[in-house]
Image (cartoon, rainbow, N blue to C red):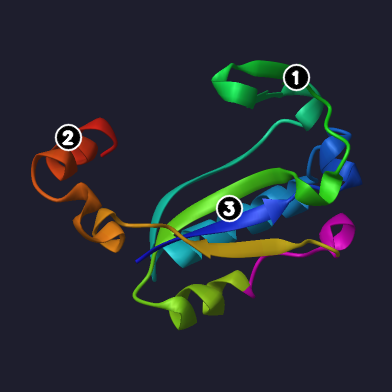
Amino acid sequence: MRFMLIRHADEATEAGVMPSRELAQAMIDYHEEMGRHLKVLGGDGLHPSRRGKRISFPDGKPLIVDGPFAETKELIAGYTLVEAKDWDEVMSWAVRWPCILEEANVTLEVRQVYELEDFGDVFAGELGDKARQAIP
C-alpha cells in the first residue's frame, strides 16, 4: 500500500522561511531511519504558493490564476510518499515527524494512494496496461 504524508503549509512556509540546519538534519535523519523500515518512494518541499499557479476548468476551459493563495490551511508545503504494509505501519512513522523549535505546530495529513486495482474493472485489460506505462 502506498501512502502520502502531506505537510500542510503555515505562515512560515508561505513566507519562504528556510529550515534551520538542526531541522534539516532532523528531517534527513527521519527519512533515513524511515527508509530502513518503509520503502520511501519520494518526497520534497514545495515553494510558497506565491510562486505557484492554479488551473481550474470552468465549462471545460482552462483558467489560470497566479499565487499566492489565501487559505494557508489548505495548502501543501511538502510531502513524503511511502510504501507500507498497512495504516498502522505508516502511522507509526507519521507520529515521529520531526517537530523542533519553529516546527512545533506542524499539521500532517496521511492519505492512502489509489492503486489501479482499487478501481475495479475500470482499468482492466489494455486500458490498465496503458495506464501502467503512462504513469509507472
Mark 2 or 3 closer to N-term?
3
The kind of residue on which mark 1 rests is: Val
Quickly name the residue at label 1.
65
Indicate the secondary structure of the residue bearing disc 3. helix
The kind of residue on which mark 2 rests is: Lys
Please provide the residue range marked out in magenta.
95-104
Find the residue positioned furthest to the bottom: 88
Position of 16 relative to 71 (above/below): above
Indicate the secondary structure of the residue bearing disc 1. strand
Measure how far apart labels 3 and 1 are at the Cα level: 34 Å
Quickly name the residue at label 3.
28
Specify the quadrant of the image occupied by residue 77: top right
Measure how far apart labels 2 and 3 are at the Cα level: 36 Å
> Majority secondary structure of the magenta segment?
loop
Where residue 40 sits: x, y (%)? Answer: 41, 56
Position of 89 relative to 2 (above/below): below
Residue at point 83%, 32% (across, down) = 69
Disc number for residue 135: none
